[in-house]
Image (spheres, rainbow, N blue to C red):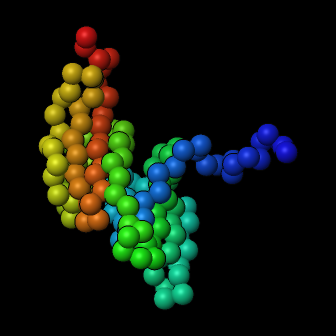
Amino acid sequence: MDAKRWKPETYPQVIPYLVVDDAGALMDFVLKVFDGVPADRVPGPDGNVQHGEVRIGASMVMVGRARTPDARTTSMVYVYVPDVDATYAKALAAGATSVQAPADQSYGDRSGGVRDAFGNQWWMATHLRPASG
Protein backbone atom coordinates (compact mmCIF):
# COMPACT_ATOMS: atom_id res chain seq x y z
CA MET A 1 0.00 0.00 0.00
CA ASP A 2 1.31 3.43 -0.94
CA ALA A 3 1.86 5.40 2.29
CA LYS A 4 0.57 8.56 0.58
CA ARG A 5 -2.84 7.05 -0.23
CA TRP A 6 -4.14 6.04 3.17
CA LYS A 7 -6.39 9.14 3.19
CA PRO A 8 -7.44 11.70 0.59
CA GLU A 9 -4.61 14.19 0.12
CA THR A 10 -6.69 17.29 0.85
CA TYR A 11 -8.34 15.95 4.02
CA PRO A 12 -7.01 16.34 7.57
CA GLN A 13 -6.45 13.19 9.58
CA VAL A 14 -9.27 13.89 12.09
CA ILE A 15 -12.68 15.12 10.94
CA PRO A 16 -15.71 15.75 13.15
CA TYR A 17 -18.87 14.14 11.72
CA LEU A 18 -22.15 15.56 13.01
CA VAL A 19 -25.38 13.64 12.32
CA VAL A 20 -28.63 15.62 12.58
CA ASP A 21 -32.17 15.67 11.19
CA ASP A 22 -31.41 18.40 8.62
CA ALA A 23 -27.83 18.13 7.36
CA GLY A 24 -28.37 20.92 4.85
CA ALA A 25 -29.39 23.38 7.57
CA LEU A 26 -26.39 22.49 9.71
CA MET A 27 -24.12 22.78 6.70
CA ASP A 28 -25.55 26.25 5.96
CA PHE A 29 -24.98 27.28 9.59
CA VAL A 30 -21.30 26.26 9.42
CA LEU A 31 -20.88 28.03 6.07
CA LYS A 32 -22.37 31.30 7.41
CA VAL A 33 -20.82 31.41 10.86
CA PHE A 34 -17.31 30.18 10.14
CA ASP A 35 -16.95 31.46 6.56
CA GLY A 36 -16.77 27.83 5.50
CA VAL A 37 -16.28 26.62 1.96
CA PRO A 38 -18.53 23.82 0.74
CA ALA A 39 -16.50 20.79 -0.29
CA ASP A 40 -19.30 18.32 -1.02
CA ARG A 41 -23.10 18.23 -0.84
CA VAL A 42 -24.67 14.85 -1.59
CA PRO A 43 -28.45 14.76 -1.92
CA GLY A 44 -30.50 11.81 -0.76
CA PRO A 45 -33.37 10.30 -2.77
CA ASP A 46 -35.73 13.03 -1.49
CA GLY A 47 -33.36 15.83 -2.59
CA ASN A 48 -32.36 16.82 0.97
CA VAL A 49 -28.68 16.76 1.91
CA GLN A 50 -27.71 13.23 2.96
CA HIS A 51 -24.01 14.03 3.43
CA GLY A 52 -22.09 17.29 3.31
CA GLU A 53 -18.58 18.54 3.86
CA VAL A 54 -17.49 22.05 4.79
CA ARG A 55 -13.91 23.34 4.96
CA ILE A 56 -13.02 25.80 7.70
CA GLY A 57 -9.47 26.88 6.89
CA ALA A 58 -7.38 23.69 6.73
CA SER A 59 -10.01 21.74 8.68
CA MET A 60 -13.05 19.81 7.56
CA VAL A 61 -16.44 19.24 9.17
CA MET A 62 -18.69 16.51 7.80
CA VAL A 63 -22.44 16.50 8.34
CA GLY A 64 -24.92 13.72 7.74
CA ARG A 65 -28.64 13.28 7.87
CA ALA A 66 -29.84 10.93 10.59
CA ARG A 67 -31.68 7.94 9.18
CA THR A 68 -33.45 7.36 12.49
CA PRO A 69 -33.94 9.57 15.57
CA ASP A 70 -31.52 7.50 17.63
CA ALA A 71 -28.81 8.04 15.00
CA ARG A 72 -28.59 11.77 15.82
CA THR A 73 -25.44 12.97 17.53
CA THR A 74 -24.41 16.09 19.37
CA SER A 75 -20.86 17.30 19.73
CA MET A 76 -18.75 20.09 21.06
CA VAL A 77 -16.41 21.60 18.48
CA TYR A 78 -13.65 24.14 19.24
CA VAL A 79 -12.79 26.46 16.34
CA TYR A 80 -10.06 29.11 16.22
CA VAL A 81 -11.19 32.23 14.37
CA PRO A 82 -9.59 35.62 13.65
CA ASP A 83 -12.26 37.57 15.58
CA VAL A 84 -14.18 35.60 18.21
CA ASP A 85 -16.56 38.46 19.00
CA ALA A 86 -17.62 38.88 15.36
CA THR A 87 -17.98 35.11 14.87
CA TYR A 88 -20.04 34.80 18.06
CA ALA A 89 -22.35 37.57 16.82
CA LYS A 90 -22.71 35.83 13.43
CA ALA A 91 -23.62 32.59 15.21
CA LEU A 92 -26.35 34.31 17.22
CA ALA A 93 -27.66 36.01 14.06
CA ALA A 94 -27.74 32.57 12.36
CA GLY A 95 -30.05 31.23 15.08
CA ALA A 96 -27.66 29.82 17.67
CA THR A 97 -28.24 30.37 21.37
CA SER A 98 -25.55 31.58 23.73
CA VAL A 99 -23.75 29.17 26.03
CA GLN A 100 -21.14 31.73 27.07
CA ALA A 101 -20.33 35.18 25.71
CA PRO A 102 -16.72 35.69 24.61
CA ALA A 103 -14.34 36.40 27.48
CA ASP A 104 -10.58 36.38 28.00
CA GLN A 105 -9.41 33.07 29.49
CA SER A 106 -6.38 32.32 31.68
CA TYR A 107 -5.07 29.88 29.05
CA GLY A 108 -4.55 32.74 26.59
CA ASP A 109 -7.65 32.49 24.41
CA ARG A 110 -10.63 34.79 24.19
CA SER A 111 -13.42 32.29 23.76
CA GLY A 112 -17.18 31.92 23.78
CA GLY A 113 -19.70 29.27 22.93
CA VAL A 114 -23.06 28.79 21.26
CA ARG A 115 -25.50 25.93 20.74
CA ASP A 116 -26.89 25.36 17.25
CA ALA A 117 -30.47 24.33 16.51
CA PHE A 118 -29.46 20.65 16.69
CA GLY A 119 -27.84 20.79 20.13
CA ASN A 120 -24.19 20.93 19.03
CA GLN A 121 -21.98 23.32 20.95
CA TRP A 122 -19.60 25.44 18.91
CA TRP A 123 -16.83 27.01 20.97
CA MET A 124 -14.91 29.68 19.14
CA ALA A 125 -11.69 31.34 20.17
CA THR A 126 -9.05 33.82 19.18
CA HIS A 127 -5.65 33.13 20.71
CA LEU A 128 -4.32 36.26 22.42
CA ARG A 129 -1.21 35.19 24.35
CA PRO A 130 0.54 32.22 25.95
CA ALA A 131 -1.23 30.73 28.95
CA SER A 132 -0.54 32.39 32.26
CA GLY A 133 0.66 30.02 34.88
Image quadrant containing the C terminus: top left
Looking at the rendering, which quadrant does residue 48 occupy? bottom left
In the displayed structure, 92 sits above or below 26; it is: above
Residue at 18% x, 29% y is: 104
Q: Residue at x 30, y 56 (%)?
A: 120
Say which quadrant the N terminus sits in. Answer: top right
- Left-right relation of 93 to 73: left
Residue visible at 54% across and 87% down in the picture: 45
Image position of 20 with respect to 33: above or below: below
Query: Would residue 131 appear left or right of 10 to someone viewing this image?
Result: left
From where the camera sits, is residue 27 visible? no
Q: Residue at x 27, y 28 (%)?
A: 109
- In the rendered image, which quarter is residue 28 located in? bottom left
Q: Position of residue 72 (x, y in %)?
A: 38, 67
**Residue at far right of view:** 1
Judge from the rendering whether residue 53 lies leftward or rightward of residue 101; answer left or right: right
**Measured from the top left, where is residue 119 in percent x and y?**
27, 60
Give how far across and how far down residue 91 sits, in percent: 24, 56
Q: Where's residue 9, x and y in %? A: 69, 47
Which residue is most to the front?
A: 70
Tell me if residue 49 can be seen.
Answer: yes
Left or right: 101, with 128 as reference point: left
Closer-to-camera residue (68/103): 68
Query: Compared to 36, does 83 lie above or below?
Result: above
Residue that sits furthest to the top in the current view: 133
* Picture layout, residue 129 above or below residue 98: above
Q: How many marks?
A: 0
